Amino acid sequence: MRINYDWRLARLLNDEDAIIDEIYWTSNVTVSNLVRRLLALQRGRLSPEARVLYERFEEANIDSEGHLDDPSWPAYGKDEQVMFDEAIIKMAKLKIAESSGDLDKRLDMLVSSANEIRSAWTTSESRCIEWIGLFLTEINLDTRRKEIIQSVVKSDSITSTADLLETTRPIFNPSESEWGALKQHCESVISLTKRMNQHEDSIRVLALDYMPTLSSLMGPLSASKLLVLAGSRERLARMPSGSLQVLGAHAAMAAHRNGASPPKHGSILFSLPQVGKSPRWVRGKVARFIAGKASIAVRIDHFGGVPWREEEISKINKDIESIINKFPKPPKRK
Amino acid sequence: MKRKVNSLGWGVRKEGRNIWTRNAVKGISVRKERRKRDGRNEWRLWDPTKSKIAASLLRTRLNPSEIIPLPGDNCLYLGSSTGGTVSHIHDCVCGSGNHHKGQIIAIDISTRMMRDLVRLSEIRPGIVPVLADARDIKQISPFINKKVDWLHQDLSISDQAKTFVKVAEVFLKTNGIGLLSLKAASERVSDGSTENKFEKAQDILENSNLEVIERIDLKGLEEQHVLFYCRLNK
């Protein structure tokens, strides 16, 4: 015996395909109830009618696609078709609206937006420094980099900027409109800095809540970047630690497929001081160790484990130090 | 000089190297495509560089009218995106106000794509937008009342042929038309060259209940793509 069902009815058939029992959905048939029903069916649940039949005939097999092979399965009536068409649009809209509750997508937006701001900031900040350097030729653009843009924003002219920075006044002054453009560009850099800080604060708050263990291991910003590269927390949690280790090393992995040696770490792991500031001959070992621990950490976060406390994190950091100390000298060349 | 017009079926015609579909919603383009009047009817240009079905109509060596569904058919479209191609299929399957009583169940996994598809389905009755993972049969089956006459899969995933066979065997009618747009770049690198990937996919299709009628190379219109035109035998 088997039970076939869709959102309208459930049917019990014997092995000769004869209908033994049939229940139609008759009470509270509304569009909003149909939306609920379709959502439940899509999640793999039984319809209430199919459940009733199953409770009566527990030995029957349930087949969610069985109705497609039943030649006598009724086609939609006119009213049913109208209701289905209305419900399907409502359901799609509901699911689209629900996607704003998806923390993976929200972190993706925040991290991607922060990356774009950072890239815009780097370009604009360098341009402003070079632009001011064209007029203030005596100032050291490296050591006093941080003050320069702030000073321009506070000044009315290039000469007052020079006075503020206690450097030689320029021989040629920019025109009024040129100065206005330069000042506005510097103001936009300051505004980008504020926006970047705001983005990073939001990422920290979300990540500490969504991935507490991974965030305490790697820092919330790196943890979020890893999540975005993986696609979602679930994908990161299901990922082998070897894949996590090379997340962000797309180009190196592509080269590896063509015969180059494999990358030791991705860009996110390299940005961790434990990896990036270690001697080059232990970076791979440290990256592998951290990737293994990060893999466990994200699984704890995703599958509802007990988040690591300070003691566990400091033990991991000690283990990293012992790996670094174990290999004080580079290996001999073969 | 007026170009020769070839009808490829109801609501689809070829003029020179252009394909046009009879616009089911007059005065509205879906993705800013050209429209033109012809008496009481309005025709929409079907861009073969943006639609693999349109590309296959130009590239097939067989009768192109066999590839497209008939008016009133029940169709399943996996990986519908924002509904550009779906709208042209809708022009011929449903027509204005769905007077052919056809249906296109359009599946996509992305909420961003689904936003546009929902808006499209509101003005084009007959399109059923479903936000679901096309690889998971259980997520699709609640929306399908009877087996479909025409199936098209356009998914950027690995194992495209395996997914197509799995879906076709469940949802496609016997003798129904199945079209698989295979994107080589989405398959695993370990599967070898582009040609190896196409061969492997063809083997998978031929070892199933599907009969591969034609392998249509879309080179020049869609790079690294072929479209397998199949029929389901049982």
Image (tube, rainbow, N blue to C red):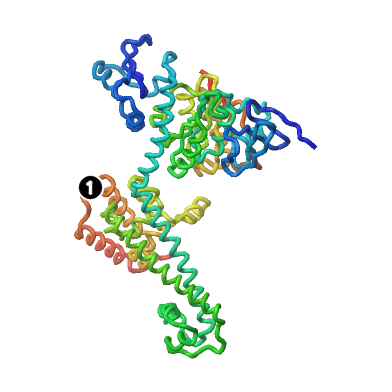
A212 over B103 or under it: above or below: below
Left or right: A209, with A257 as reference point: left
Name the residue: 60% across, 35% down. Answer: B26
Q: Residues within 10 Å of mark 1 (few under 14, many from 20)?
A: few
| Whole-percent x, y for residue B34 in the image | 64, 42
Quickly name the residue at label 1: A305
User: Can residue A282 be seen at all in this image of the molecule?
Assistant: no
B151 or B75, which lies in front?
B75
Question: Which quarter of the picture shows residue A213?
Answer: bottom left
Q: Secondary structure at mark 1?
A: loop
User: Along the horizontal axis of the image, is A233 left or right of A180?
Assistant: left
Number of numbered labels in the structure image: 1
Where, by quadrant of the figure, is residue B95 drawn?
Answer: top right
In percent of the image, x 61 and y 25: which residue is there? B213
Between A296 and B97, the one lying in front of the other is B97
Identified at 49% across, 73% down, the residue is A185
Q: Position of residue A29 (x, y in %)?
A: 33, 25
The vertical placement of B87 against A148, above or below, is above
- Residue B39 in view: yes
Q: Is residue B204 left or right of residue A307?
A: right
Q: Position of residue B54 (x, y in %)?
A: 62, 35
Which of B224 and A144 lies nearest the eye of the viewer?
A: A144
Q: Quadrant of the N terminus of chain B?
A: top right
Label 1 sits on what residue type? Gly
Q: In the image, residue B130 lies at what x, y percent?
A: 43, 34
**Residue at the (29%, 17%) spot, across then down:** A60
Q: Chain of mark 1?
A: A
Q: Residue furthest right?
A: B1
Tell me where residue A17 sits by quadrant: top left
